[in-house]
Amino acid sequence: MEQNNYTELLQRLDPAKVPAHVAIIMDGNGRWAKARGLDRSEGHVEGVATVRRITEIASEAGVKCLTLYAFSTENWRRPQPEVDALMHLIGIAIERETPDLIKNNVRLTMIGDFARMPEEPRRRLQGCFDATAHCTGLVLNLALSYSGRWDIVNAARRIAAGCADGSISPADINENLFSKYLSTASLPIDCPDPDLLIRTGGDKRVSNFLLWQIAYAEIDVTDKYWPDFSKADFLEALIRFQSRERRFGLTSEQINQ
């Protein structure tokens, strides 16, 4: 049933208006599991399956970059057993999915405090980064041990260091220069700031995610928990995006001209 549904939705998409960069706050794994009387870790396992199908449909729809908020810096404060289980799951899942990523020409990247990741998932992630480095299709970008404020502070610190050693003049600091010091500047393609931010789970907040980069992103919130988020749901979000007028501070009349 879903196959027929999402195939029809794909045909409704305007290829010229597909967002180049989609960012997703994958929320609701724990609540999905709790509603079914399961351990929270079961929700995270089911969430991995959703990552797989949304990566597939994003690539099929023509999205160039898909950034998934997988683990925030604030998530380190969760109960240690849950953190340990999630870190283990991330490493195992990435290693297991690597052959399919290569098969589908998907390149895996990451933004966040990589050094803070435990040794095992860090090693498995690095293996996938290296194995998919030649892929030229969709960039699947995981935000791990990441927060928007961490990103901005880290950029400011690097710029300040440049000013101190004379490689940057304070007069040269502007939005364009600042953007070059954010973590997303390291993405392997010319990936713009997110055009569309999707949040599952119903909460209407951005949760410290890509605070600088989503300044003009269109926001789409669904009450569905991440494990229930389907290919059709993703395509419907893209279709809603295509119906919106993006003015970037201008008037409708200026846009139409």
Image: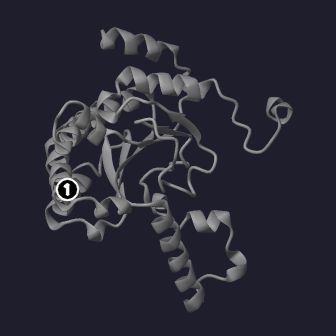
63 with respect to 212 (left or right):
left
The residue drawn where x is 29% and y is 52% is: 133
Residue at numbered disc 1: 87
Q: Is residue 27 above or below residue 212?
A: above
228 with respect to 148 (left or right):
left
The residue drawn where x is 16% and y is 41% is: 39
The kind of residue tagged 1 is Met
The residue drawn where x is 28% and y is 71% is: 115
Percent x, y of residue 122: 20, 62
Secondary structure state at the residue bearing disc 1: helix
12 with respect to 137 (left or right):
right
Q: What is the crowding at mark 1: few (fewer than 14 residues within 10 Å), some, or many (at least 20)? A: many
The residue drawn where x is 31% and y is 27% is: 228
Q: Coloring scheme of the render?
A: one colour
Percent x, y of residue 30: 27, 42
Percent x, y of residue 46: 21, 35
Res 178 → quadrant: bottom right
Q: Is residue 16 visible?
A: no
> In this figure, what is the number of numbered marks?
1
